[in-house]
Amino acid sequence: WDKKLRRLMHYFESDSQLQDILITGGDALMSQNATLHKILDAVYKLAVRKRKANETRPDGAKYAELQRVRLGSRLLAYLPMRINDELIAILKEFKEKASEAGVKQFIMQTHFQSPLEVTPQAREAIKAVLSAGWTITNQLVYTVAASRRGHTAKLRQVLNSVGVVCYYTFS
């Protein structure tokens, strides 16, 4: 895995247009904290190297610098107890370091499908992620069943009330 991570970071570093990294793997938060910390640290070092390389590159040949890091996860909805103090500390530390390296946006993309999923535990998990300085956005798969019962409209209201940005609905 370490070898593959180095190859991936080298690939991203040599991409002159890369500005956005989405970490998913199916679900980014299914990784152990130590693994996620290692991945985020590699992304941070990538951002630093790209920024440093631009100091000596002529205008017109500069790399696009990393602007946004996103984590894709549905765990806020179905396993909110995964959002523990250690994970929040990792997210907060990464945000602080990567901000200094020029990264501007830190987003956790989640997938709540129904307001019934926004349990008290999910609300606490959302609050914790927001406290680490990350934005949470929700991608909603628009289904006929949920829309007929009004779940879609209610879900948007509930998520907005707890600080989640409902930005994407698709079918």
Image (cartoon, rainbow, N blue to C red):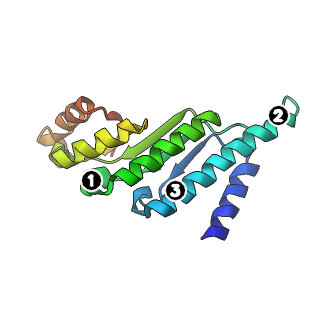
Pick the front one: 109 or 80: 80
Q: Position of residue 158 (x, y in %)?
A: 20, 34
Whether residue 103 is visible, yes or no, is: yes
The CA distance from mark 2 to mark 3 is 28 Å
* Label 1: which secondary element: helix
- Badge 3, how many Cα within 10 Å: few under 14, some, many 20+? some
Q: Position of residue 150 (x, y in %)?
A: 14, 37
Q: How many numbered marks are there?
A: 3
Please say if the residues under marks 1 and 2 sit with CB atoms less than 8 Å apart.
no
Which residue is tagged 2? 55
Please name the amino acid that badge 3 sits on: His
Pick the front one: 168 or 73: 73
The answer to whether residue 119 is left or right of residue 100 is: left
- Badge 1, how many Cα within 10 Å: few under 14, some, many 20+? some
In the displayed structure, 61 sits above or below 28; it is above
Q: Residue at x 56, y 59 (%)?
A: 38
* Label 3: which secondary element: helix
Whether residue 25 is visible, yes or no, is: no
In the displayed structure, 102 sits above or below 129; it is above
Which residue is tagged 3? 37
Please name the amino acid that badge 2 sits on: Glu
* Label 2: which secondary element: helix
